[in-house]
Image (cartoon, grey):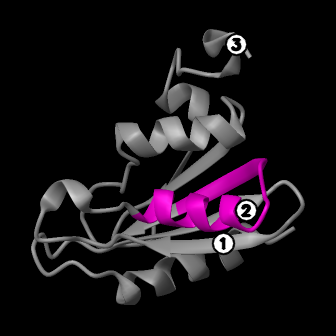
Amino acid sequence: MASEQELIAKASAMLDMAYVPYSKFPVGAALECEDGAVYTGCNIENASYGLTNCAERTAAFKAVSEGHRRFRRIVIAGRCEDYCWPCGACRQVLNEFGGPQMEVVCLNGKGDAVRLTLGELLPHGVDSVWLGN
């Protein structure tokens, strides 16, 4: 299991990997799976803005593509004054594999952190119970 400081360092390092020629708003993420594996991601923009992918989903999709289906926590880093919160789409994707108990650590540009559960960020998210699975 990675320490929170290790995850913060990995998420922050991904800020320099972000492809953000349009928004100039880099985001980095470090996702810890239940078995301790860590996957990182950054946001990747596209001229057709709807095709942009967020850092959180980049990390999640990398983890799932490598066979990981259960997430423990994610750290999300940005360079802004406010905390870097996951968007609604990312919250729902994380809910699919982490559930409402998953820990979400959001950083601001100074490195201050807020810790929440995904259930606090996404109350009543769609899950397998909702889908009848």
Identified at 39% across, 40% down, the residue is: 89
For mark 3, does the 10 Å Cα neighbourhood hold few (<14), some (14 to 19), or many (20 or more) residues?
A: few
SS assignment at label 1: strand
Where is residue 127? Give x, y as percent.
63, 22
Between label 1 and label 3, give the one nearer the viewer: 3
Q: Secondary structure at mark 3?
A: helix
Label 1, label 3: how many angstroms apart (C-alpha)? 27 Å
Q: Identify the amino acid type marked 1.
A: Tyr
User: Residue shown at 67%/64% (left/top)?
Assistant: 65
Identify which amino acid the numbered label 3 is placed on: Val
Residue at left 51%, top 19%? 123
Residue 72 sits inside the magenta stretch = yes
Q: Give the Cα separation between the discs numbered 3 and 2.
A: 24 Å
Determine the CA span between mark 1 and mark 2. Answer: 7 Å
The circle drawn on residue 32 is: 2
| Viewer-proximal residue among 108 and 25 | 25
Label 2 crowd (10 A; few <14 / some 14-19 / many >=20): many
Location of residue 48 in the rendering, given as x and y in whole percent from the top left corner:
12, 63
Q: Secondary structure at mark 2?
A: strand
Q: Amino acid at mark 2?
A: Glu
Which of these two is toward me, 84 or 27? 27
List the residue tagged with mark 1: 39
Can see residue 43? yes
Bounds of the magenta segment: 55-75
Vertical comparison of 130 with 83: above or below: above
Q: Which mark is residue 129?
A: 3
Front position in the image: 108 or 49: 49
Which comes sooner in the sequence, label 1 or label 3? 1
